[in-house]
């Protein structure tokens, strides 16, 4: 029995006309008539009465119509069940984030993945770059967020956004500049060399490395008085007035929301990318999480919390 012929038979009955049925199913009327004739020949029985008033089911046609409805309904349900199993995305996806990124992305990411892919189990690790990179290259992380705009021979990088770094804390007022009344003060980058700074330890992919590169290009000395690999304590030092720090302003939440921060001119920007190993075979769950990350960072760009690449 040809399933296509059964579909055509139902269409003819449902629409009451060969012409209308042919239009709906998208075949020529002679082809539809041939399918009906073949079906009647297969069962060796007339299925429809044809007249100037339309068509009507014979007794045999009523029986076939009832069974055809059941058969096609079961096929549709089977197709839906198989597709739903095939489309069910599941598995473990591990991600490493630096603290400044985790502060903005972790909760939105968890909520979105739980809502859209409940079978996916996220493993999220927060830490500074050297620890994360070690886990990453040992293939204990599927993804890592790095502040870079391009990949390498071993790393695939998906650029997501940019962010500007600000001076956070209580610098001497003489180091600040107000260009116009009623505008927020800024700090010229040349004046940062006079400030005692508390910064993270150096690493090839880290914020400290980028700051030192920018300072070196302008022949500015970096006056680091304390190294801290803890976002909480970096901000606490700034809040206590022990030293200023340089971080994205998006980390100023909770008890640190009112900490003074100043735009650095010219801006120090860094690019944020989601990275994975070129040699890795990403499972469907990983691809799904990657898409969610892109959506969330896109929303942050739209609201002004991050800048477009």
Image (tube, grey):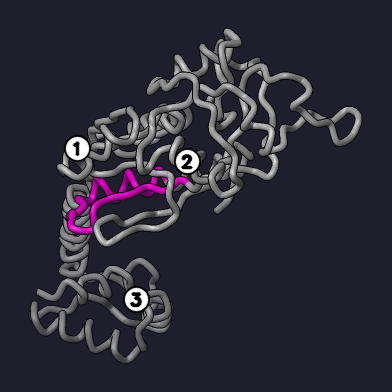
> Badge 2 local density, few (<14 within 10 Å), some, or many (20+)?
some
Image position of 290 with respect to 254: above or below: below
> Badge 1 local density, few (<14 within 10 Å), some, or many (20+)?
few
Give the residue furthest to the top.
Answer: 240
Q: Which mark is residue 177?
A: none
For the point 63% across and 40% down, which residue is it? 304
Give residue 28's position: percent from left, percent from top.
36, 88
Lateral position of residue 98 relative to residue 131, left or right: right
First reached walking from the N terminus: tag 2 or tag 3: 3
Lateral position of residue 38 relative to residue 22, left or right: left
- Alpha-carbon span between mark 1 and mark 3: 58 Å
Q: Secondary structure at mark 2?
A: helix
For the point 45% across and 54% down, which residue is it? 149
Give residue 99's position: percent from left, percent from top.
41, 27
Which range is magenta?
Answer: 272-293
First reached walking from the N terminus: tag 1 or tag 2: 1
Report the number of discs. 3
Q: Quadrant of residue 128?
A: top left
- Alpha-carbon span between mark 2 and mark 3: 57 Å
Q: Secondary structure at mark 3?
A: strand
> Badge 3 local density, few (<14 within 10 Å), some, or many (20+)?
some
Image position of 10 with respect to 27: above or below: above
Q: Which mark is residue 55?
A: 3
Q: Which mark is residue 92?
A: 1
The magenta stretch spans residue 288: yes
- Name the one closer to the observer, 280 or 164: 164
- Name the one closer to the observer, 116 or 211: 211
Give residue 5's position: percent from left, percent from top.
20, 76
Q: Are marks 1 and 2 in contact (CB under 8 Å)?
A: no
> Label 2 belongs to which residue?
296
- Name the one closer to the observer, 93 or 100: 100
Give the residue furthest to the right.
Answer: 181
């Amino acid at each position: 029995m040809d399933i296509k012929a059964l579909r055509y038979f139902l269409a003819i009955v449902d629409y009451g006309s060969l012409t209308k049925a042919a239009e709906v199913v998208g075949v020529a009327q002679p082809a539809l008539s041939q399918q009906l004739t073949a079906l009647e020949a297969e069962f060796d029985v007339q299925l429809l009465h044809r007249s100037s008033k339309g068509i009507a089911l014979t007794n045999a046609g009523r029986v076939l119509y009832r069974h055809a409805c059941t058969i096609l309904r079961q096929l549709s349900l089977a197709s839906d069940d198989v597709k739903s199993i095939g489309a069910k995305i599941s598995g473990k996806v591990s991600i490493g984030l630096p603290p400044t990124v985790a502060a903005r992305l972790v909760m939105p990411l968890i909520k979105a993945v739980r809502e859209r892919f409940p079978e996916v189990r996220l493993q999220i690790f927060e830490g500074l770059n050297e620890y994360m990179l070690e886990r990453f290259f040992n293939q204990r992380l599927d993804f890592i967020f790095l502040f870079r705009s391009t990949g390498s021979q071993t790393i695939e990088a998906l650029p997501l956004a940019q962010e500007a770094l600000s001076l956070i804390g209580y610098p001497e007022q003489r180091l600040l500049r107000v260009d116009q009344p009623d505008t927020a003060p800024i700090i010229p980058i040349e004046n940062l060399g006079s400030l005692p700074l508390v910064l993270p330890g150096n690493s090839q992919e880290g914020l400290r490395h980028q700051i030192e590169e920018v300072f070196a290009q302008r022949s500015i000395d970096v006056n680091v008085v304390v190294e801290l690999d803890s976002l909480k304590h970096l901000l606490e030092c700034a809040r206590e007035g022990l030293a200023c720090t340089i971080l994205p302003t998006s980390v100023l939440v909770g008890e640190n929301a009112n900490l003074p921060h100043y735009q650095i001119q010219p801006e120090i920007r860094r690019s944020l990318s989601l990275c994975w190993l070129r040699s890795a075979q990403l499972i469907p769950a990983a691809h799904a999480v990657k898409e969610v990350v892109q959506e969330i960072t896109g929303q942050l760009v739209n609201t002004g919390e991050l800048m477009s690449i």
